[in-house]
Amino acid sequence: MLDPNGPLPPTVYWRRRAIALALALTVTVLLGWCLALLFGGAEPEATERLAAPATASKPAEKPPAEQAAAPPPECPDDAIRVAAEVGRPSFKTGEKISLGLVVTNTGQRPCVRDLNRVQREIEVLGPDGKHVWGSNDCVIESTNEKPLLRPGQPVRNDVVWPGLTSTPDCGPIRERIAPGDYTAVAKLGEITSDPAPFKVVAE
């Protein structure tokens, strides 16, 4: 079977067989290289796709803004401004008088302050500077008020005074105030506001 038969010399047939064998080997090598390139080149991409989620799944550290913040400090007296406000410059005798107590944080950062009902008071002084009425004279009730005061943001409490006198011990005698010049003073603990003047005129 290996001996060449035909009209041509044997060397011709051996040469043809050598060329055919070389072509077959070349095709086999090229086919193997293509298969290796096709399947071998896809493997790294798949590895990267699988490795990426593993890296992303690591727990991330919380930024400083999300970490537990320390509670705001208490507002010191030197960072608190207390002001008294009067609804109008003048009122008629027998007319209800609107008054206000305003607390403002004058510091540089938020803080909390005890604004309990027994800590704050509005006092009205007569023309002679004596006590005429106080918001805590007959109503002293404890309240749970400790708000966060932001810098420059006022917190106010309004009171409507019927224009009758009272005493710190809540005595039974209450009289309508006479016409004259009066001042309202706001207090928060040991802090006292500047006086806010107003007039009461005859009807």
Image (tube, rainbow, N blue to C red):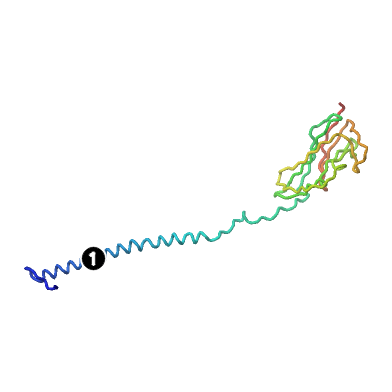
- At mark 1, the secondary structure is helix
Instruction: Give the left or right position of residue 153, taking residue 16 as reference.
Output: right
Q: Quadrant of residue 187?
A: top right
Locate residue 138, reporting x and y percent: 87, 42
Instruction: Give the left or right position of residue 196, taking residue 24 as reference.
Output: right
Instruction: Give the left or right position of residue 191, taking residue 45 as reference.
Output: right
Q: Residue at x 45, y 61 (%)?
A: 50
Locate residue 171, reporting x and y percent: 92, 40
Locate residue 190, reporting x and y percent: 83, 48
Amino acid identity at mark 1: Thr
Q: Quadrant of the C terminus?
A: top right
Count neighbours of disc 1 (C-alpha within 10 A) and say few if under 14, some if 14 to 19, many if 20 or more.
few
Q: Nearer the viewer, residue 135 or 87?
A: 135
Q: Quadrant of the N terminus?
A: bottom left
Q: Nearer the viewer, residue 57 or 149?
A: 57
Above-or-below relation of 199 to 27: above
Q: Nearer the viewer, residue 65 or 94?
A: 94
- Residue wearing tag 1: 26
Locate residue 133, reporting x and y percent: 87, 39
Residue farthest top in this picture = 203
Above-or-below relation of 89 to 156: above
Instruction: Give the left or right position of residue 137, taking residue 53 as reference.
Output: right
Q: Residue at x 39, y 62 (%)?
A: 43
Q: Quadrant of residue 176?
A: top right
Q: Nearer the viewer, residue 24 or 98?
A: 24
